[in-house]
Amino acid sequence: MQNLRSFPLTFVFLSIAFLAIPGCKLEIKVPQGGAVRSTDGAYVCEAGQICKIDVVDLFFDQTFIAEPAAGFYFGGWRTRDRYLCGGTTTPCQLSTAAFEGNPALESILESDESFYLKPIFLLRLDCPDPELVLSPDPAVHGFM
């Protein structure tokens, strides 16, 4: 009978210990205008959501694609400190496989640090003459 009474308490302690395992975090911040999905379908983050992913081992390997909604286009991944794939417009591949044997990278993986992925979705302006939108020349706009 002693073993049965201690089981729930042991289970609680093991659960807490498991939840306390450190690991870096990936936060996908999706603005209005689209969604972000992993190519294998494991992760889907819709407009207006912040999706948090725990990255806890050397087996994390995901490619994320920004999918603009109707009337928007993908302008690239946000560039800031701790933002991943910044300045690119291609799918964002993230893998921890190369971390193995590199103490500096392994320490990041074992930390509780957060890293970010944020697409930039821009409103598509369907203008018959793009020069009207892009030109700083007042004459083009008919002001001279």
Image: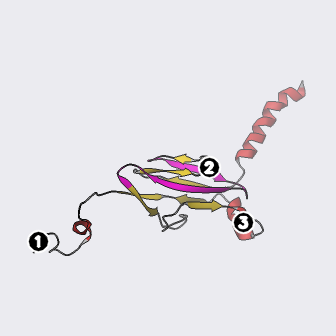
In 3D space, how far apart are the residues under numbered discs 1 and 2 (Cα atoms)? 52 Å
Whether residue 99 is in magenta: the answer is: no
Q: The N terminus lies in which quarter of the figure? A: top right
Earlier along the polypeptide chain: callout 3 or callout 2? 2
Residue at image location 81% in from the left, 36% down from the top: 10
In 3D space, how far apart are the residues under numbered discs 3 and 2 (Cα atoms)? 22 Å
Amino acid type, label 1: Phe
Residue at image location 78% in from the left, 41% down from the top: 14
Q: What element does badge 3 sit on?
A: helix
User: Is 140 left or right of 76, judged from the image as shown?
Assistant: left
Q: What element does badge 2 sit on?
A: loop
Earlier along the polypeptide chain: callout 1 or callout 3? 3
Q: Which mark is residue 40?
A: 2
- Residue 116 coordinates in the image, percent (x, y): 54, 59
Q: What element does badge 1 sit on?
A: loop
Q: Which residues are magenta?
A: 46-72
In 3D space, how far apart are the residues under numbered discs 1 and 3 (Cα atoms)? 58 Å
- Residue 9 coordinates in the image, percent (x, y): 79, 34
Instruction: Between residue 95 and residue 70, name the one nearer to us.
Output: 70
Instruction: Between residue 48 and residue 137, name the one nearer to us.
Output: 137
Q: Which residue is mark 3?
A: 99
